[in-house]
Image: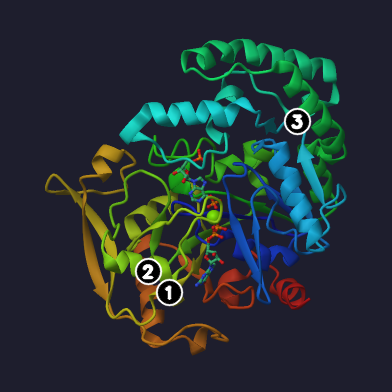
């Protein structure tokens, strides 16, 4: 059976959690490949809202194995807080449901402290991170100083690595007037996590290989969004991991040919949390209205999300760098009743039309977006049973977006609930087994 990669095509919060949860029954395994508990993936089922951070969004389906790849950075305390909260809601999250790669890096107590210093030092140029220690954990990974989940298996190795890190960080802490790190208490804390996390730890690459050999299918789950990717995003206003499609292969130890299709999750407008360029941002009352209607507050930090019009230049770029086969369009219901809806079709920069999306913030800050105004749809889209029952003007909106981003829409999400989704069978054929989706989401 085919494997599918699901990722965000904008600056995160496109509704990946909702779509991954919905499609999970068609897959045997759901595997996250990057990021950490900076992610906030919301799933709403029959009025119950669950926000996932580290645990893959397939966890609500008891038959699905959830995998956390080597490409993630894991805070053990965040992991057990989340599993505890899920258990309290009757969702099983033991080692038979969740596997964690021994190659994943651990977020250590010094990481959020180092991040605070680095954000303060940037002043007005701060990234506006989630302050979870994500960036510094990836920095240590690249610096070859990182502590990996697999190191928990040998307390001597763990102790040595902690000592090496404390020695490296001490001068920084001293320079910024922070109290010194206590290596001994950190060792004690992580020895405790070693015991708890041990049963979850696996060779994830081998596990996935064996499962696929047996004929099982995998849904690869991205966090953040392509424009937050450390290589292809609006650097330096990005996260520190590879959120784009290539990250799935390195972040799980699978070959690129195991990815048979790519579904890009795309919001019908644009949002961004934290700092960084945003050409179509609405800094006025309308922006705030969209934020209020779309409930655009960070699922992780609660920060208000900046809102703006759909940016076809950015999404077309995203579709290209990720090889997106189909789009799942989310949250168009939020735009209902707004009258005419502008869509950004191009950028001009210093009087010239740009051919493609520039990732440099100093260019993006100065581009002038060109808009095409499209007729809106007055009525709510909630509860639309099928594609045929969607308003004519909204279908026209979809067609214009498809032309602009050169990719077909295969899923239309019309509300927060799992069931508020229109699946376009002809566009999903070959990518998702819809009979399994329907059987699973009714369960
Ligand atoms: P993710 O990070 O990509 O998983 O997205 P988030 O969960 O952070 O943010 C998406 C928000 O939009 C969540 O509150 C979802 O419940 C909500 N949502 C998802 N799809 C739709 C939709 O089609 N319509 C509306 N109104 N809300 C949606
Ligand atoms: P999901 O998976 C939206 C943003 C932060 C900040 C930048 C770097 O829910 O879509 P970090 O803490 O990662 O070093 O912050 O990236 N950011 C997100 N924005 N959705 C997310 O995740 C995000 N994860 C990180 O706001 O601008
Ligand atoms: Mg989110």
Q: Which residue is mark 3?
A: 149
Residue at the (73%, 66%) spot, across then down = 26
Q: Earlier in the sequence, mark 3 or mark 1?
A: 3
Identify the image quadrant of the C terminus. bottom right
Discs 2, 1 touching: Cβ within 8 Å: yes
Viewer-closest of 3 and 63: 63
Q: Earlier in the sequence, mark 3 or mark 2?
A: 3
CB at disc 1 and ligand 1 closer than 8 Å? yes
* Disc 3 crowd, CA 10 A, few/some/many (<14, 14-19, 20+): many
Viewer-closest of 199 and 377: 199
Classify residue 383 as left or right of residue 31. Answer: left
Q: CA distance from mark 3 to mark 2?
A: 41 Å
Q: CA distance from mark 2 to mark 1?
A: 7 Å
Classify residue 22 as left or right of residue 354. Answer: right
Q: Which residue is mark 2?
A: 290
Label disc, if present, on residue 381 of the rendered structure: none
Check the image and report above or below for 202 versus 144. Answer: below
Residue at the (34%, 41%) spot, across then down = 359
Residue at the (41%, 87%) spot, across then down = 379
């Amino acid at each position: 059976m085919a494997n599918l990669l699901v990722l965000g095509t904008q600056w995160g919060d496109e509704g990946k959690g909702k779509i991954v949860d919905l499609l999970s029954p068609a897959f045997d395994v759901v595997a996250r490949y990057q990021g950490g508990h900076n992610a906030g993936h919301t799933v709403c089922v029959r009025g119950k809202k669950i926000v996932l951070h580290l645990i893959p969004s397939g966890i609500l389906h008891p038959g699905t194995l959830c995998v956390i790849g080597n490409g993630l950075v894991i805070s053990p305390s965040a992991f057990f807080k989340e599993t505890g909260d899920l258990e309290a809601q009757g969702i099983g999250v033991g080692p038979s449901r969740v596997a964690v790669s021994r190659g994943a890096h651990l977020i250590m107590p010094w990481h959020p402290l180092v991040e605070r210093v680095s954000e303060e030092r940037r002043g007005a140029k701060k990234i506006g991170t989630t302050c979870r220690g994500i960036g510094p954990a990836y920095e240590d990974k690249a610096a070859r100083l990182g502590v990996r989940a697999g190191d928990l298996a040998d307390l001597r190795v763990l102790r040595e690595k902690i000592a090496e890190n404390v020695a490296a960080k001490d001068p920084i802490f001293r320079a910024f007037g922070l109290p010194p790190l206590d290596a001994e208490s950190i060792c004690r804390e992580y020895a405790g996590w070693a015991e708890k996390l041990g049963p979850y730890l696996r060779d994830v690459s081998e596990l996935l290989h064996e499962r696929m050999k047996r004929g099982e299918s995998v849904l690869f789950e991205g966090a953040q969004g392509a424009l937050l990717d450390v290589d292809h995003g609006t650097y330096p206003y990005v996260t520190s991991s590879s959120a784009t499609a290539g990250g799935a292969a390195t972040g799980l130890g699978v070959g690129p040919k195991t990815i048979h299709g790519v579904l890009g999750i795309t919001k019908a407008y644009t949002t961004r949390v934290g700092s960084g360029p945003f050409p179509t941002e609405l800094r006025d009352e309308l922006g705030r209205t969209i934020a209020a209607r779309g409930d655009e507050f960070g699922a992780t930090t609660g920060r208000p999300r900046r809102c703006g019009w759909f940016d076809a230049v950015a999404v077309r770029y995203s579709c290209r760098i990720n090889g997106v086969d189909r789009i799942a369009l989310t949250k168009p219901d939020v735009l209902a009743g707004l009258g005419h809806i502008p869509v950004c079709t191009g950028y001009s920069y210093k009087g010239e039309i740009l051919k493609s999306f520039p990732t440099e913030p100093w260019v993006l800050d100065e581009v002038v977006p060109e808009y095409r105004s499209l007729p809106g749809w007055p009525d709510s889209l909630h509860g639309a049973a099928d594609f045929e029952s969607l308003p004519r003007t909204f279908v026209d909106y979809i067609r214009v977006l498809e032309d602009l981003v050169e990719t077909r829409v295969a899923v239309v999400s019309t509300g927060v609930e799992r069931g508020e989704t229109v699946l376009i069978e002809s566009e999903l054929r070959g990518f998702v087994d819809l009979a399994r989706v329907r059987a699973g989401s009714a369960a």
